[in-house]
Image (cartoon, rainbow, N blue to C red):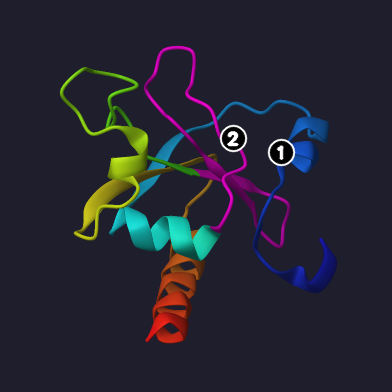
Amino acid sequence: MENGEFRVLTREEYEKIPWRSSSKVGELFAPPVDVSSALGTPTIREPSSDGKTDREWVIIDPNGELFRVYAYKATAEYERGLPRPEAFWSIEGGWPLSIGGNTNPIYVHEWITERILETRDLDA
C-alpha cells in the first residue's frame, strides 16, 4: 500500500477488490456527523438490500486489511420511525457505529478518532 497509511477506498477501487466476507469486529462511539466529516464520501452510498445499512466507508490499512464503518439498523431505510439517513448522519451526539472486518480494529479505530479530532480542529 502506498505511503503505508490508512485510507478510505473509492467505489471504483472497492469494486476491483475480490469479495471478502467480514463481520463486526468492533465499535466506534462517535457523533455520526463527525465520522461523516472525517471520512468524507462513503465508499458505498446506497442502502443494503435489506436496509440494515444505508452507507459504508471501506477503509484499507497499511497491510491491505479492509474495514467497514457503518451504522447498523439505525435509519429509516431499515425501520419506519428511525431517522432518515440525512438526519442520522447529522447527529452531533455520540452514537455506536459498527466496524466490520476480519482482524482487530484497534488501529483503524485510532486512525478514525485522529481524523475526527483533526477535522474538528480545522472547523474551529
Label 1 packing within 10 angstroms: few (<14), some (14-19), many (20+):
some
Identified by mark 2, the residue type is Ile
Along the line of sight, the residue nearer the viewer: 28 or 33: 33
Q: Is residue 55 left or right of residue 10?
A: left
Identified by mark 1, the residue type is Arg
Label pair 1/2, CB-CB below 8 angstroms? yes
Residue 66 sits above or below residue 32 on the image: above
Image location (x, y in percent) of residue 100 = 47, 40
Whether the magenta-drawn stretch holds residue 53 is answered as yes
Tell me if residue 60 can be seen.
yes
Along the line of sight, the residue nearer the viewer: 45 or 99: 45
Residue at image mark 2: 44
Label 2 packing within 10 angstroms: few (<14), some (14-19), many (20+):
some
The residue most toward the top is 50
Q: Secondary structure at mark 1?
A: helix
State the predominant SS element of the stretch in magenta. loop
Q: Is residue 54 left or right of residue 72?
A: right
Q: Is residue 111 left or right of residue 5?
A: left
Q: What's the distance in space between the residues labelled 1 and 2, CA to CA? A: 6 Å
Residue located at (25% from left, 53% from top) = 91
Task: Identify the magenta region.
Answer: 40-68
Q: Is residue 81 left or right of residue 78?
A: left
The N terminus - image quarter: bottom right
Q: Secondary structure at mark 2?
A: loop
Whether the magenta-drawn stretch holds residue 109 is answered as no
Residue located at (56% from left, 34% from top) = 45
Image location (x, y in percent) of residue 38 = 49, 65
Residue at image mark 1: 11
Image location (x, y in percent) of residue 11 = 71, 38
The quadrant holding residue 79 is top left
